Image (cartoon, grey):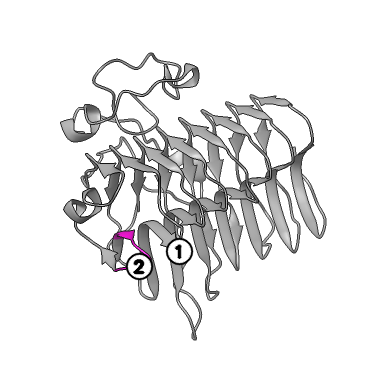
Amino acid sequence: MEGVGLDSIGIFTNNGSALITANVVSWGQGSNSATGIFNSGSTPRIVGNTIGGTPGLPNASYGIYNNAANAVILRNSIDGGLGCVAVTGIDNEAGSIAQIYDNIIHAGVGQSGDSVISTGIWNVSSSATIQCNTIDIGNPGTGSTTAGSVAIGVTVSTCSPVIDDNIVFSDHGIIFNQTQYGIVEQGASSSPNELRNNDIYNCPDALYVQSTTANLTAISAVNSLPGSGNNVSTNPSFKQMTWTAAGWTTTDWHLTSSTPAAVTQGGETLSGTDLGVDRDGIARTVPWSIGAYQ
């Protein structure tokens, strides 16, 4: 499925409860914005889709955009695409209370020479439940001659999401004129209700940005935050970490025999019908693994 226009959208839901499952969604060549799945005032269930890849270059590109939409987003492959201002895997806006489980998410790629923000999951006035996902903060590029680019795993702005059992990571090293953060608070009243049992790895500028104090680069400092605990910062040793231009065909974020026990056995045992199996449909067993795969 693909859209073309000033603002192109692959799938649009409005005031309904659609089931969107087992699709391959490419959101086309909108010159202003391009979105894989746009949900407005709706309660869709989005399961087992591959969302990503845009041949155009919009200002802003989104894998999934929720506007006052309480979506269940489960076991998908989501790519934020390619943009020259912002690229985002999942954007939760305007009171959307999304449930985001067992997805693999790549924030997206920025256009070279532009100042781009890439974000795995963006939350603005929208307290989502974010559990058991594997999230690449993306590669927004080196920025422009006047401003750098910023890569973020999860942004929290004027809301209090639940963030448990996720792997949030950068798949590359330090890049000139690019800032890399794991989780970022933006302004007052912007802190997770829970931040537990996550692996936040290879985010050199800060594992966590606390809006009222400082950039936290030590996992011990992250674990001292209110509602936080049992988070780690260790190489998850995926089968194949690096995202290339070929996208999902060149990555494999399954855990391996080299994955540390802090990841394979470090997850919190969570409740909920959708959380009983991992992204492959394999039953989760105690101790749970962190990320989308048991």
Is 281 colored magenta in this rendering?
A: no
Question: Foreground residue, 194 or 3?
Answer: 194
Q: Position of residue 148 (x, y in %)?
A: 45, 76
Please say whether residue 209 is one of the residues in the magenta stretch.
yes
Q: Confirm or deny contact between disc 1 and disc 2 (CB under 8 A).
A: yes
Percent of width and height locating residue 66? 65, 45
Q: Mark 1, residues whose alpha carbon is within 10 Å: few (<14), some, or many (≥20)? A: few
N-terminal label among 1 and 2: 1
Indicate left or right for 64 with 214 as reference.
right
Residue matched to label 1:
188
**215 lies left or right of 221:** right
Q: Give amino acid for label 1.
A: Ala
Q: Residue at x 48, y 81 (%)?
A: 147
Q: Secondary structure at mark 1?
A: loop
Task: Name the residue at the bottom extreme.
Answer: 146
Mark 2 residue element: loop
Say whether residue 173 is visible.
Answer: no
Work out which residue is located at the far right of the displayed protein and give it. Answer: 5
